[in-house]
Amino acid sequence: MPRDELQNLAFRRQLFFPTAEIYASKPAGFWEFGPIGVRIRNNIINFWRKELVEKERLLEIKGSVILPKEVFEASGHLRSFNDPVVQCKKCHALFRADKLVEEKIAKHIPESKSIEELNALLAEHKIRCPKCKGELSEARLFNMMMRVLIGATQNQECFLRPETCQNIFLDFPRLYKASREGLPLGIAQAGSSFRNEIAPKQTLLRERELGQMEIEIFFNPDKINEIRNFSEIANYKLRLQRLDRGAIEEISCEQAVKQRVVSGKLIAYWLARLQQFYEKCGIALEKIRFRELSSEERAFYAKETWDFEVLTDLGWIELVACNYRTDYDLKGHSKGSKKDLSAKEEGKAFIPHVFELSAGIDRTFYVVLDQAIRKEKRGKDERLYLALVPQLAPYFVAVFPLVNKNGLPEKAKQVFDLLEDYKFSCLYDKKGSIGRRYARVDEIGVPYAITIDYDTMQDDTVTIRERDTMAQKRAKIAELPEILWKLSVGKLSFAEL
RNA sequence: GCGACCGUAGUCUAGUGGUUAGGAUACCACCCUGCCACGGUGGUGGCCCGGGUUCAAAUCCCGGCGGUCGCACCA
């Protein structure tokens, strides 16, 4: 669905909107979620919790968004998130200093080169602005991380985390020691990260505060093929786009391991679980792929990377980065903190390896909506609705009196209270025409609507309307809780009613 | 950061120097209403911010902020 349609719906129904929008000086890249938007967003996070954290027995934490400088010295962010840039004094264009030198001398510049060395190289080779041939400024560091100063005299230098996983690495030793399961041990976290993007864009797709739901699996690299539930997904087909292949291939997890498409069963298992999760979020399989990243595209610490992507009108959008980070992180923090972060199995100590599934919450939100939005012609009118799966819908059921008189609203309120008692998330509305109320809830993706009419007053039956088909069925009020529950968990389809 | 284009109610939009800034839709109130954005009456709500030019600026100029597209960037 075209982006405009989605953004218009989002702004019209206040799903999300710019932070501090009443101030002209508001910075770009920050977004507020309104009442409907936050329900959908929370549902995404909770569904992730249910399907991955709980079912896979992961340990969830909630870490601080502020971490000390030392953490990022150890993680490499102060080196690698720090890009050396030069600016043209004439046209003010910005360039990566190392890239300019590389182009000029046709030789690779390692990331370890200091600013002084880069400046010497820039001068030595008389490098000028590639666009206007103007004179370049001295190289300086542009850091993607946001700095915060802590303490009464603001003398402690900290940073807003640029990824949520660092907390998980820091917390690993404590959780591991108390763990009764041993390895592999999975730790999960949902929360905000912050990146000082040069050019935030396309609303939720490139933000400066970004929601992440991350899973880090710590495991013994010698036992990457010892996964207890592998048989459950052995025949499940992953949609992989490998480096050396043009097309997306459907390869079973078993075959992927056998043919060494992935490093081991543990990797295949988690790719499968992730793909299944997004399928359940309502993303069509044919729009899904795992794209293998080349060594140039991958982060330097990653041995193997699969980007989970979904096809939209904007092209393939990356929702999740799946990185085999090896022992890079724990090794770094062990060195930085001078603490032993090793694990022990059968008397042998080793640094666990990490496989990471780092999902963007807001990108997922955007793409789930993008895939759910439907526009249908009905005569001369157009109908717009969100075909969200029930788990992600802002409300599960709406309750309406057919007309706002003759005791119908009171009766409808009783039905609403009944359903609330049964813990359904419900919406009650008696204002305006019935058609308008249906349209309003269709637009925010409410799957079912219950309508109380004059027959209800006689025989205690109501109509249940299905959002996608607009079809209606009649049912007894007393049976509603069970019927709705069955619909919500997929034990009954609307057609079978 | 660069370049081009752009910024008028919640949303979409007319207005290119003097308008009570118009419309659609949404929203609110009342009436009507036996199932898909019904109809009627009434109503609330707007020129991104700052400076300049001018007797007069939503309109022209400059700057800021924001947006779209392209480039660059995105360990």
Image (spheres, coloured by chain):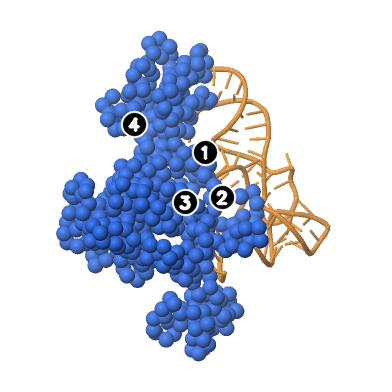
Chain colours: A blue, B orange
- Residue highlighted by disc 4: A488
CA distance for labels 3 and 4: 33 Å
Residue A300 image-quadrant placement: bottom left
Q: Are marks 3 and 4 in contact (CB under 8 Å)?
A: no
- C-alpha distance separating marks 4 and 2: 33 Å
**Which amino acid is tagged 2?**
Pro
- The answer to whether residue A286 is above or below residue A84 is above
Of callouts 4 and 2, the N-terminal one = 2
The residue singled out by tag 3 in the image is A63
| Local crowd size for mark 4, using a 10 Å CA cut-off: few (<14), some (14–19), many (≥20) | some
Which of the marked residues, 3 or 2, is nearer the chain's N terminus? 2
Q: Is residue A64 above or below residue A325?
A: above
Label 2 resides on the chain identified as A
Q: Measure the alpha-carbon separation of dots 1 and 3.
A: 25 Å
* Local SS, label 4: helix
Answer yes or no: are tags 4 and 1 on the same subunit. yes
Q: Mark number for residue A35? A: 1
Q: Earlier in the sequence, mark 1 or mark 3?
A: 1
Q: Between marks 3 and 2, how big is the CA–CA gap? A: 26 Å
Which mark is drawn over residue A228?
A: none
Q: Report the disc number at residue A18.
A: 2
> What residue lies at 44% left-to-right and 25% top-to-bottom?
A420
How would you rate the neighbour count of disc 3 (Cα within 10 Å): few for under 14, some for 14-19, many for 20 or more? some
Q: Earlier in the sequence, mark 4 or mark 1?
A: 1
What is the distance, in whole Å, between disc 2 and disc 1 at their CAs?
Answer: 14 Å
How many residues crowd around disc 1 within 10 Å: few (fewer than 14), some, or many (20 or more)?
A: few
Disc 4 vs disc 2: which is toward the camera? 4
Q: What is the chain identity of the residue bearing mark 4?
A: A
Q: Amino acid at mark 4?
A: Ser
Q: Amino acid at mark 1?
A: Pro
Q: Position of residue A102 (x, y in %)?
A: 42, 81
Quadrant holding the C terminus of chain A: top left
